[in-house]
Amino acid sequence: DAGVTQSPTHLIKTRGQHVTLRCSPISGHKSVSWYQQVLGQGPQFIFQYYEKEERGRGNFPDRFSARQFPNYSSELNVNALLLGDSALYLCASSPYGNSNQPQHFGDGTRLSIL
Amino acid sequence: KQEVTQIPAALSVPEGENLVLNCSFTDSAIYNLQWFRQDPGKGLTSLLLIQSSQREQTSGRLNASLDKSSGRSTLYIAASQPGDSATYLCAVDSGGYQKVTFGTGTKLQVIP
């Protein structure tokens, strides 16, 4: 079975641009979470979606937004990119997004802002 | 606000040695604690998930313990191997619905 897949794997943008990152969860998983991992740090929670509804949001500005589609795939959008947005963006899925279930992560999208 | 700390930041051990990685958290009201492994440039691989009602979990050479009252968890790796070299992260779910807080990780190097 395929794991969590993310696209693209690498992306280079310039300041002020907009970016869309994509995530396909494990088949049967209805919950998707997004994390930002800056080099040398642990991942920071951005969003969790379940059944197309936002169920949790971390401490990130409104430039960050996301959505989940009927097939449970998800997109993370970041507007007005800043140099500080350079990071590895990770997507994780789980069956129902409950705390008794482990999260399964993709390999991430590495975003570089010039 | 939950804060998670992992000490040491880096650890180097000879192959075959047993080792312990530490994770501490400030708010004991947690739902679960999860240990992950991250290889360079890769995503996270879940190793063990300990529910708040549990004291420990085991998988192969790995054993994780949880002491909520003291805000601590340990990951014990028996008979370490070079393939165990990676960064190990602990993550605490204290908000429910998997809104987790990660530590900064311990980078482990096992020397053949």
Image (cartoon, helix red, strand yellow):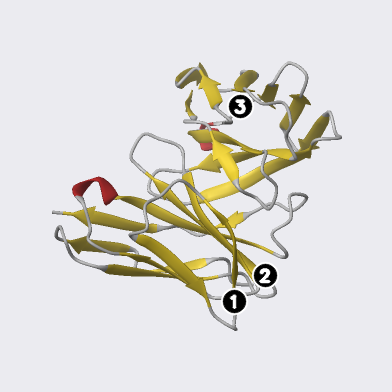
Q: B93 and B39: which one is in front?
A: B93
Amino acid at dot 1: Tyr
Q: Residue placed farthest to the front in the image?
A: A62
Under circle 2, the secondary element is loop
Which of labels 3 and 2 is toward the front? 2
Image quarter where the C terminus of chain A lies is bottom left
Who comes first in sequence, dot 1 or dot 2? 2
**Chain ID of residue with mark 2:** A
Under circle 3, the secondary element is loop
Percent coordinates x, y for residue B40 in the rendering: 40, 43
Q: Residue A46 vs residue A62: left or right?
A: right
Q: B14 and B19: which one is in front?
A: B19
Which quadrant would residue B54 be assigned to in this image?
A: top right
Q: CA distance from mark 1 to mark 2?
A: 8 Å
Image quarter where the N terminus of chain A lies is bottom right
Which of labels 1 and 3 is toward the front? 1
Amino acid at dot 2: His
**Chain ID of residue with mark 1:** A
Q: Is there CB contact under 8 Å for labels 1 and 2? A: yes
Q: Residue at x 27, y 64 (%)?
A: A79
**Chain ID of residue with mark 3:** B
Which quadrant would residue A33 be assigned to in this image?
A: bottom right
Q: Residue B6 vs residue B10: left or right?
A: right
Amino acid at dot 3: Ser
Percent coordinates x, y for residue A71 in the rendering: 59, 82
Residue ID for mark 3: B80
Vertical side of B24 occupied by B61: above or below? below
